[in-house]
Image (tube, rainbow, N blue to C red):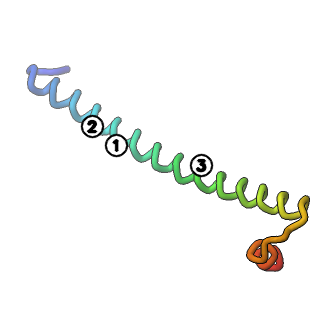
Amino acid sequence: MWETRGNRILEISIIVILGAIVSILNTLWLRESLIEQIKIIAKDNENNIIKQSNVTDIATKLRQQT
């Protein structure tokens, strides 16, 4: 399979580098997805707080109307 030690080291290095690239891309994709989910949850929580409380802040009232 491997003719020389150099070829074996090169092959292992390529596998490790490709694995690292895949891992980094997967982490970035999951992070982006997680941020989107957090935004949705935060917006839902904000809407629930506004609906369940007496709002006295003018900025919050204006945001509620839009």
Q: Is residue 25 left or right of residue 59?
A: left
Marks 3/1: CA–CA distance: 20 Å
Which residue is drawn at the image coordinates 12% and 27% (left, top)?
7
2 or 3: tag closer to the N-terminus: 2
Residues marked 2 and 3 touching at CB (< 8 Å): no
Which residue is drawn at the image coordinates 84% and 58% (left, top)?
48
Tell me where residue 65 appears, x and y as whole percent. 83, 79
Tell me where residue 37 appears, x and y as whole percent. 66, 52
Marks 1/2: CA–CA distance: 6 Å
Residue 17 bears which disc, if any? 2
3 or 1: tag closer to the N-terminus: 1
Is residue 12 depicted above or below 51 in this figure? above
Is residue 46 depicted above or below 10 in this figure? below
Return the residue at label 3: 34
Return the residue at label 1: 21
Q: Amino acid at mark 1?
A: Ile
| Residue nearest the viewer, comparing 29 with 52 | 52
Q: Choose mark 3 or mark 1, whichever is in front.
A: 3
Q: Is residue 28 left or right of residue 8?
A: right
Which structural element holds mark 2?
Answer: helix
